[in-house]
Amino acid sequence: MEKSKVIIILFLLFRITQMYGQTDAPERNIDDTGFFLSLGANYTNFQDLKYSNVQMQGIGIAGGLGWHKLTEKQAWEASLNIHYSNQSTSLNSFADANAINANLKFSWMRNLKQHSPLKIYLGVALDSDLNFRQDGELGNNSFYYLQGNTVSAQGMLRRKLNEKWDISYGLSIGLLSMAKESTSFAFSAPQEYLESGEFDYLSADDVIKPFKRLQFEPIGKYTRLESKLAVHHGKWGLGYLWNFTKYRQIKNYEVGTAAHRVTATFTF
Amino acid sequence: MKNISLIIIAIILLFGNTSCEKIALKSNPSVDNESIYDEYWKIFKEKYAMFDAKNVNWEEVKNVTRPLVNNTISQDSLFSVLASMTITLKDGHTVLIDYEKSTGAFFDLEEGYPKNLNEDLVKLYLKGDVKTQGDGLSYVTLDENIGYITYRDFEKEVTNEMMDAMLTDLKDTKGIILDVRGNGGGDPSYAALMASHFTDSEKDTGFERFKTGPGKNDFTDSPAKIRPSSGVNYTKPVMVLTNRGCYSATTTLIYSMNPLNHVKFIGGRTGGGSGSVADGYLANGWYYSLSTSEFIDNDGLHLDDGFDPDIMIDLDEDDLTKDEIIERAIEEIL
């Protein structure tokens, strides 16, 4: 990211703590627990340099359900989110793919600044993420997935704006992952199977199954970032989430996928 | 004031995220003629697995064809140049298609070869109590107590259950004729599964050499074996009928069954197509496919250009009373 933009963002985050450090709004301890549903829209971006430099983008729907527990001391969350988009490119009218992402996530964070107007939570998250794409007009390359299971460092700033509204900003950075991609450099079978000389057509269906023969991948090889800005009003919330995954299984031939998601959430 | 700051922060974050994406992802390629040529040539340079086997020097091809391309020639002319490069490889799996203009470039591997398949003649044998399994397998027991199976398309599903049921029906026959003439391929895993029902022991069949990186010598080999199924396995004489139309996954069947002593191949030279295929779109939307692996059998034979059966025999196109290839297979079993 350009240095100037990084500096601006860090400055603004610092200003949040300054501006909201002194406030007339009365303190309120947080105690928010319940199941939630979310629904919204998303915009996705995908590029697989093993296949093409062409970026594919699409708009679609996003939904999720989960459970969270937010107190002065801790924040817990378990969620399942699924989003779908139809991706195409502005360069031609033929490349067209349906993309589905399913993400199962568990997180725990501890509040480092209890009884303070600005709460700073820090903890860990564990998520299992499956990106699946299908371009029905292709043959062997019509089907693709990228599956990753990641341990991330996660943080959240949460601040009460007034009696009724809260605002939060969260950031998650993947540290270590176990990942698998359905395609290799030039074929629709995982690279690891080909490099180990284990591929054969009798076991081909087994070879491509997700969750099988995952590879340990550190940050840098499997990069996973997520940021979320949300406002909360009682049982309702409105959030903007961005997540980005990049997998460098083969040097200089990375696959990158990103999603921008706006969702409304209801806790019940 | 705070709300305005909030909006500004949200906008900064949005653009910040988007900027991160733009930096992390490569920018879209160009779609001018020269870029499309370079893209196509590079795809093959990095991914095509059989330049040596096909005796094609891809750098030389570039030396000859690249000067023909500039950004002023028409799309049709550009397509013609890329088409000539495609056909140079003489590979039935290597194809270039412009769907917008409904035009394509591919190597006609059947040109100059006898067809050796007449479905009207096949009907003289596949009659009476004909059974089927799924959409692709049809079979009957001939008067000579020989099983006759036709299977023309490896896109049609084959399962262990289907093979078990069919071979149970044919278990008392003296032998089986497996007619895969005209089978242009489909799913190689179906071929491997089918072959596994014709052996009772594991055997090496050769290896598949995959292109696993962009460098000229970035290959890895995966040894191939035929392993017996856990169900019904038929090990009495099997005659596999072939012609030039046998291609791709049918070659997988052939190389899987070739090491088996009770199996013979009868008919015409096959089309080959031993490699696995990758496909995609160029940046301008033209569809391409290419071979990204090659199969080499235990005798060191490169099977992409075809396989010669044990007994070469052609149909007499003037004789519409019998299928000479089926008749020879019956003779071999009896």
Image (cartoon, helix red, strand yellow):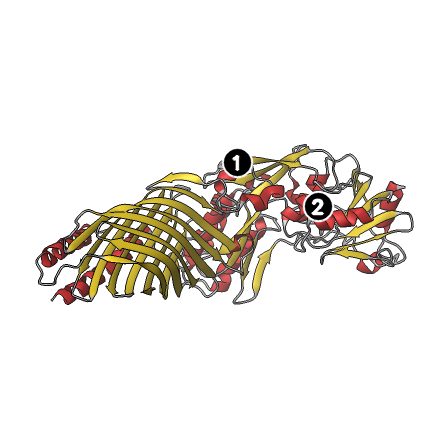
In the picture, the quarter occupied by the C terminus of chain A is bottom left
Task: Write down the quadrant of residue B54 in the picture.
Answer: top right
Q: Is residue A186 above or below residue B296?
A: below
Depth check: A259 or A194 in front? A259
Q: Position of residue B236 (x, y in %)?
A: 82, 39
Amino acid type, callout 2: Met
Q: Which chain carries label 2?
A: B
Q: Is mark 1 on a helix, strand or loop?
A: strand
| Mark found first going from the N terminus, 2 or 1 | 2
- Comparing B231 with B113, the one in front is B231
Look at the picture and state if B326 lies above or below A232: above
Q: Distance between the residues labelled 2 and 1?
A: 26 Å
- Looking at the image, residue A90 sits to the left or right of residue B91; the answer is left
Q: Residue at x 40, y 52 (%)?
A: A104
Decide: is B73 above or below A197.
below
Q: Which of marks 2 and 1 is in front?
A: 2
Disc number at residue B194?
2
Residue holding disc 1: B220
x%, y% of residue B131?
A: 80, 56
As drawn, the label of residue A199 is none
